[in-house]
Amino acid sequence: MAFAGKYQLETQTNYEEFLEAIGLQTAKTEHKVVTEVVQDGDNFTWTQSIPGWSWTTSFTLNKECEMESMKGEKFKGTATIDNEKLSLKFPEYFFTAEIVNDKLEMTCVTPGENSVTFKRVSGRI
């Protein structure tokens, strides 16, 4: 599955609830987040940005890599692709991404009894 490209936020659900659940309420923005994915085979660089802020993490599929969460915390994780869906366990949530109708659909699910499912759909730009 080719994820490479630049995408701009179109819709999202449970955004504020997700930020609160992972302790990033101060990250709330009204800007349209731009996600850029650079893919070279199994190697990925994933960047999300708004004016004045960006977050980048890099990983190789099926290989434990040291990454950085949106909160700036270093962690080790292994990204996989199954049925054309990218999956990765972050410290605060479980992340999946897939291309559906040429749009990048990302879902983040926090663990626990009060789990929050955050979904973001971005169109290619």
Image (tube, rainbow, N blue to C red):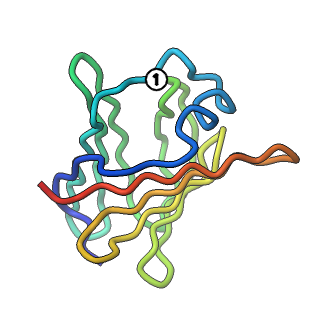
What percent of the width, then of the height, locates residue 123? Answer: 23, 58
Q: Above or below — where is 106 with respect to 80?
A: above
Q: Is residue 11 left or right of residue 5?
A: right
**Residue at image location 50% in from the left, 69% down from the top:** 80
Near-viewer residue (47 or 104): 104
Near-viewer residue (87 or 75): 87
Near-viewer residue (8 or 54): 8
* Quadrant of the drawing holding the N terminus: bottom left
Secondary structure, mark 1, is loop
Q: Is residue 80 left or right of residue 41?
A: right
According to the picture, the residue beneath numbered tag 1 turns out to be: 28
What percent of the width, then of the height, locates residue 56? Answer: 33, 36
**Residue at image location 50% in from the left, 54% down from the top:** 119
**Residue at image location 40% in from the left, 69% down from the top:** 98
**Residue at image location 46% in from the left, 40% down from the top:** 67
Q: Above or below — where is 40 with respect to 26?
A: below
Total marks placed: 1
What percent of the width, then of the height, locates residue 71? Answer: 52, 24
